Image (tube, helix red, strand yellow):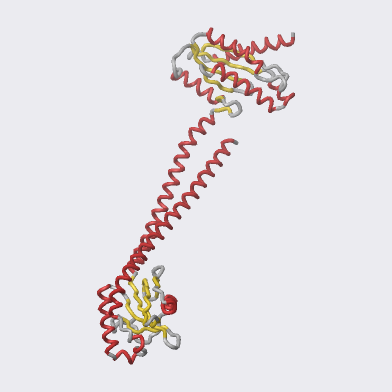
């Protein structure tokens, strides 16, 4: 039951850590994405402002009044500005450089398109502005703002970054200059960076989960192994540990050679009576009292095991049998005070037997059992008399 609860607890820990790692991965990915996006946009803004300083010197204010239809493309004003804009566009490596205005009919139209006239997507005087960029142009022409794109736009004519600068005359907005940067390579690089950063985050997430599980196993394995050999009620080793320890002593000998090895067994009297009369909670206290007595007097010399319902075993090294006998006598004197009389009127007593351990003696447990039950029988007869 406890093992199941521990495994459930371990699973919950792993789940919580996985969720935290996922959130951290998402946070890292979002941060990388946002920061890289901001860096790209900031660079494009600076580049746009630098280009516009040169464009502004070539703008002819009259063009916003005199150019209205394709027929006006024959004018010297149009041809001169077209040549200037085309030259600027090529030298600045801009995809599109043009001027635009809002007509008296409320339409947004091109004026000068500094692009190759033979190109398929060349715009003539009076051609309507594409719907994708009307919103940005509107802000410039109505509010007089420089409108920088918040991000790269994926349009029908490719990925572009668009900036509009208002053109004024005597404090009035008469038109706008549009700069569109070819962002296809930037867009592809950004998508590649997103995929790479996402892959890195996933790999880091998997690595983190793997390390977490590995660490939990390293932490939990010794704990669970110890748990498998521990009596949870009394916090001493259990019968499995007792049998394993006996085998190890027989094969490898004691951990330290500090004296003679003795096996002592204890049988707690009246446990059934305590359970029946005062309940199992009191019975548990009765068992814990026995375990605490053994820990107090024998733990410095020995290992303590609960090997049955009311039976305990101790394997330890003592300087001599006389030392062991003296310790056992001290325990007998201390035992009556372990269970308070107001809690339990049953006298706290136990029987025991011991023998020196010899590796070649396979009957030592039987010998100690016989000695212990002989004492128990004598105690029973004494109580009856």
Q: Is residue 69 above or below residue 240?
A: below
Q: Where is residue 102 shown, x and y percent of the image?
A: 41, 84
Q: Nearer the viewer, residue 59 or 114?
A: 59
Query: Which residue occupies 44% across, 45% down?
Result: 210
Q: Nearer the viewer, residue 291 or 363?
A: 291
Q: Nearer the viewer, residue 37 or 194?
A: 37
* Quadrant assignment for the C terminus: top right
The furthest residue to the front: 170
Q: Where is residue 57 shown, x and y percent of the image?
A: 28, 78
* Quadrant assignment for the N terminus: top right
Q: Is residue 222 left or right of residue 80?
A: right
Q: Is residue 334 left or right of residue 193?
A: right
Would residue 69 be seen by someone viewing this image from the given angle? yes
Query: Which residue occupies 60% across, 25% down?
Result: 234
Q: Is residue 305 left or right of residue 164?
A: right
User: In the figure, residue 329 lies in which quadrant?
Assistant: top right
Query: Which residue occupies 47% across, 38% down?
Result: 217
Q: Where is residue 75 shown, x and y percent of the image?
A: 29, 91
Q: Where is residue 62 shown, x and y percent of the image?
A: 33, 87
């Amino acid at each position: 039951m406890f093992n199941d609860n521990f495994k459930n607890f371990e699973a919950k820990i792993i789940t919580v850590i996985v969720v935290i790692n996922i959130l951290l991965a998402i946070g890292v990915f979002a941060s990388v994405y946002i920061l890289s996006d901001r860096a790209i946009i900031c660079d494009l803004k600076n580049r746009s402002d630098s280009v516009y300083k040169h464009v502004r010197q070539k703008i002819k204010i009259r063009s916003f009044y005199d150019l209205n239809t394709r027929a006006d493309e024959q004018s010297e004003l149009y041809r001169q500005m077209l040549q200037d804009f085309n030259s600027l566009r090529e030298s600045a490596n801009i995809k599109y450089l043009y001027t635009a205005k809002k007509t008296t009919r409320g339409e947004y139209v091109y004026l000068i398109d500094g692009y190759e006239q033979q190109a398929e997507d060349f715009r003539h005087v009076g051609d309507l502005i594409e719907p994708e960029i009307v919103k940005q142009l509107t802000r410039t022409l109505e509010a007089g703002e420089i409108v920088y794109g918040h991000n790269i736009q994926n349009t029908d004519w490719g990925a572009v970054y668009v900036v509009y600068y208002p053109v004024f005359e005597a404090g009035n907005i008469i038109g706008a200059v549009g700069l569109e940067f070819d962002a296809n390579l930037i867009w592809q690089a950004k998508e590649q960076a997103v995929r790479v950063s996402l892959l890195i985050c996933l790999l880091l997430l998997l690595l983190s989960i793997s390390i977490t599980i590995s660490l939990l196993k390293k932490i939990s394995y010794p704990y669970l192994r110890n748990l498998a050999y521990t009596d949870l009620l009394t916090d001493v080793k259990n019968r499995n540990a007792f049998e394993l320890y006996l085998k190890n002593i027989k094969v490898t000998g004691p951990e330290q050679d500090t004296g003679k090895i003795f096996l002592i067994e204890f049988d707690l009297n009246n446990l059934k009576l305590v359970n029946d009369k005062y309940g199992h909670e009191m019975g548990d206290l009765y068992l814990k009292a026995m375990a605490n007595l053994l820990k107090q007097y024998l733990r410095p010399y020995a290992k303590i095991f609960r090997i049955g319902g009311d039976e305990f075993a101790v394997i330890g090294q003592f300087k001599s049998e006389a030392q062991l006998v003296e310790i056992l006598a001290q325990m007998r004197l201390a035992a009556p005070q372990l269970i308070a009389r107001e809690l339990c009127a049953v006298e706290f007593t136990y029987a025991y037997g011991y023998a020196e351990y010899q590796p070649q003696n396979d009957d030592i447990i039987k010998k100690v059992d016989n000695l212990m039950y002989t004492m128990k029988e004598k105690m029973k007869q004494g109580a009856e008399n």
